[in-house]
Structure formats: C-alpha cells, structure tokens
Amino acid sequence: MKSLMKLFVFTLLAIFCGGAIYAQVLPGGHYLLPANPTSADSLKLSLDGMCGRYYNYRANPYVVSMTQNNITVTLGESSGICGTLGSPRQEIDLGRLPAGSYTVTVNLVVSEGIATPPLFTNVPFTVGDARATKAPPYVRLDYSGQWWDPNDSGWGLFIWHDARDNVLAAWFTYTPDGKPMWYVFQPTWQTSSATFEVPLMQTSRPPGVTSPPPNPLGGVSYTLAGTASLNFTNYGTADEGKLTYTFNGGPKLVRTIQRFKP
C-alpha cells in the first residue's frame, strides 16, 4: 500500500511540476522541431492551431525575445475565424541555439485591453552540442555563399555548406567558344579549412519545350571532367580561398576566390 501511495504521489508531482521528467515535451499538442535539437539545427516551435483555440492569427506576426536562456514568444492577434478543416499548425522560428538548457514561454497578445493568460510558461528544454557527434575535423566557419575572382569576372562558384559540414559546390563558367557550362563537386573536409580533391562533374541536358523546368532526369547527362578542391587555409576569414582543379588529367590550375559582396 505504501509503495502504491508513493507511486501515486510521484505521478501527481510529475504532472503538476510542468514536466520535470519529460522536459522536452510541451503541453497541449505543441512540440519542438526537431524534438531533440542540437546546436546544428534550426529550431522551430510548432503550435497546435486547431479550431477552438485562441490563436487563429491575423497577418501580424509573432515576436520572439530572449533574456539569458529564457525565450518568450508573443503571438499575433486572433482572427476569431475557424475554417471547417481547422487551422494549420503555427511554426515559430527560434533559430540556431548554442548547446545548453533553456525555457520557453508563449504569450497570447493582449486584445481590447483584456490580458489573456499565457499558453504555457517556462517549459524547459535542452539543446545538445552538435560538435560531440561530428566527425573530425570540425569546421568552425560557414563558407556558404556566392564566390568569384574579381580579376576574372564572368564566372562564379555557388557553395552550400550546411551545419553538419556537408558541401555542394556549383561552378558556372564558359567553354572556349563562349557557351555556358556548369560543373558540380561535393568535397569532404581534409582539415578544418581545406577539402579533399574530388571528382569534378560536368552537367548538361537537351533543350526542353520550356526552360525551366528541365526535361526529365533521363535527358540529363553527368560527365567526369576532372577534379576539384577548396582551400581556405591561412586566409583568416570565411571570405577568401582557393579553388584548385584539373581538366581531363591536365595540370592543376588554381584560382583565388572571394565571397561576392554587392
């Protein structure tokens, strides 16, 4: 009997203390995206927008503020309109947060001078350290952006570098007879600022009825054109680097590249 009583009291404490056991679980059908965020994730707060709740929003957006590790979200004004299929979920962008412990409070906007109680208050959640799960080397700078050589305009390099250090580079340039040509490569990191040499692929497709979109993938060709690598060593910032490449077994060529700044 005493054991059952202890279990009953423990369950009540877990329910009324705001989720000390399930710190990542938000009340009322609300949740974090992703559920177990790390410092590499762009974190969103997904709110239940079903009919019957207070926050079918008008066009005015939400406001997010942060004091130390306490995040406060103030929602937009309620429209008072409920469709037959209910309201879509509302996703609040909280951004990328450093690893640590946080709380989140969601307030409803004050309407017509009447204060509305918060949706929920000081719900705790944690953000893990993405570096703990990254394979070395850990890259500390973000090289995403548009790159070019100011001394040789007319071509450029698009680099997509995600929070988990995956890289995709698309190089637009021209053939000797002036026709546009695209190359792509997907380098992996050799050090924290230099990549391995990887295949450089030439892409093309036959013209379609409309452009875009392109023809189905069956009409797209990928041809090995050479090799390519990126190196940002000894440049000190995320705004300068080197593109090293070869074509069809020829000599290595090097271009100095800079982040394009209009």
Image (tube, rainbow, N blue to C red):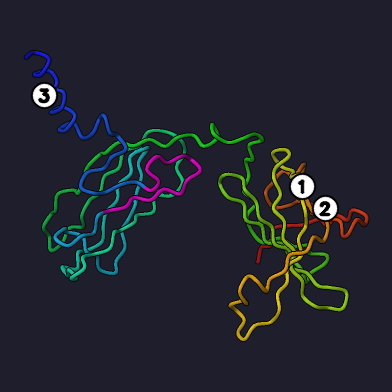
Residue that extends furthest to the top in the rendered view of this protein: 2
Magenta stretch holds residue 146:
no
Position of the C terminus, as image quadrant, is bottom right
**Residue receiving disc 3:** 8
- The x, y position of residue 53, in whole percent, is 16, 58
Q: Amino acid at mark 2?
A: Thr
The residue under the point 27% across, 53% down is 47
Position of the N terminus, as image quadrant, is top left
The residue under the point 23% across, 49% down is 29
Magenta stretch holds residue 36:
yes
- Are the residues tagged 1 and 2 within 8 Å (C-beta)? yes
Q: Main secondary structure of the magenta part?
A: loop
Near mark 3 (Cα within 10 A), the count class, few <14, some 14-19 or many ≥20, is few
Q: Earlier in the sequence, mark 3 or mark 1?
A: 3
- The x, y position of residue 204, in whole percent, is 73, 72
**Residue receiving disc 2:** 244
**Chain part drawn in magenta:** 33-47
- Are the residues tagged 2 and 3 within 8 Å (C-beta)? no
The residue under the point 28% across, 63% down is 88
- Cα distance in 3D space between marks 3 and 1: 61 Å
Q: Using the rendered view, name the quadrant where residue 182 is placed.
A: bottom right
- Cα distance in 3D space between marks 2 and 3: 67 Å
- Are the residues tagged 3 and 1 within 8 Å (C-beta)? no
Q: Using the rendered view, name the quadrant where residue 246 is placed.
A: bottom right
Q: Which mark is residue 222?
A: none
Query: Residue 81, relative to residue 42: is it above or below?
Result: below
Q: Earlier in the sequence, mark 2 or mark 3?
A: 3
Determine whether, in the image, residue 47 is placed left or right of residue 256. left
Q: Earlier in the sequence, mark 1 or mark 2?
A: 1
Determine whether, in the image, residue 139 is placed left or right of residue 21. right
**Residue receiving disc 1:** 231
